[in-house]
Amino acid sequence: MNITVVNFKGGVGKSMIAHQLITGFGYRGCEIDPYGSLSDRLPDMVERIEIQEKHLPQPVRDTIFDFGGFDDIKLDQAIGYSDLIVIPFIPTLETIQGTVDTLVRVAPMDKPILLVPNMSQKENDIADAKFVFDETLGFEVEMFALPMSVALQTAINENRSIIDLSRQGGIKGYAYKKSANLMRDLHAKIREYAN
Ligand SMILES: Nc1ncnc2c1ncn2[C@@H]1O[C@H](COP(=O)(O)OP(=O)(O)OP(=O)(O)O)[C@@H](O)[C@H]1O
Ligand SMILES: [Mg+2]
């Protein structure tokens, strides 16, 4: 299964999700982001695509395409290879426009879209964002919310899978279990779209 993770808005959690899918569930990564660090952090699993490159290599097996916060012709290629488009976003009024632009850009490509409200402060903000997206698209898109999590941030900082971290014993392992289960649930949701 190939997955494109995209949002023209920066800092919404694209690379965090890509990192956790790659380290936790055995995907390969393809980084299309000149400012990104995923391929430096996971050099054996992630291929870096240079900015001047016109073509993406055909993925040989389950691959996550991690885009930086910009538009690119390679986005069309990645989506063409993908079974699912994952769009993380932060549900605040100030940042919603970038996500709307992203939806308008990718929706015509007729691939399923999963929106991931990330680090939301209030439950209501997700409902408000959903209203805007459904109105924009004219159909409903599915959502899977991820809360702000110190455990997830620790996993990213330590360049580890949250699932792996949750396996350590004691009180620390316990703190990671909740976020690890959330990642498993997100992955299960993603797999529902596998062809
Ligand atoms: N649910 C979360 N809980 C805690 N920290 C998070 C969460 N999601 C993302 N972060 C952190 O927020 C920061 C921004 O996330 P990330 O780099 O994944 O965004 P991005 O969309 O890839 O940004 P860019 O457009 O610059 O590539 C990172 O430090 C990341 O680890
Ligand atoms: Mg990124």
Image (cartoon, rainbow, N blue to C red):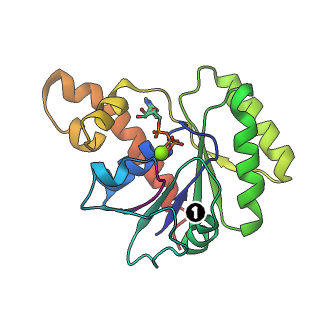
Seen from the viewer's position, the closer of residues 77 and 112 is 77
Q: SS class of the residue under badge 1?
A: strand
x, y percentage for residue 37? 37, 47
Asked if the magenta segment contains residue 31, the reply would be yes
Q: Which residue is mark 1?
A: 84
Count residues near mark 1 (Cα–Cα under 10 Å), then give few for <14, some for 14-19, many for 20+: many
Q: Is mark 1 within 8 Å of ligand 1?
A: no
x, y percentage for residue 139? 81, 54
Q: Residue at x 46, y 47 (%)?
A: 35
**The quadrant where residue 163 appears:** top left
Which residue sits furthest front?
52
How many circles with numbers are drawn on the protein? 1
User: Would residue 57 appear left or right of 110 to someone viewing this image?
Assistant: left
Q: Residue at x 14, y 25 (%)?
A: 170
User: Would residue 145 appear left or right of 149 to someone viewing this image?
Assistant: right
Which residue sits furthest left?
169
Residue 154 drawn above or below residue 54? above
Q: Residue at x 65, y 62 (%)?
A: 112
User: Would residue 170 appear left or right of 160 to someone viewing this image?
Assistant: left
**The quadrant where residue 162 appears:** top left
Residue 16 drawn above or below residue 119? below
Seen from the viewer's position, the closer of residues 184 and 58 is 58
Asked if the magenta segment contains residue 116, the reply would be no
Q: Which SS does the magenta portion mostly show?
A: strand
**The quadrant where residue 122 appears:** top right
x, y percentage for residue 116? 58, 42
Q: Which residues are magenta?
A: 30-34
Residue 19 drawn above or below residue 4? above
* Residue type indicated by callout 1: Leu
Q: Residue at x 64, y 69 (%)?
A: 76
x, y percentage for residue 33? 48, 53
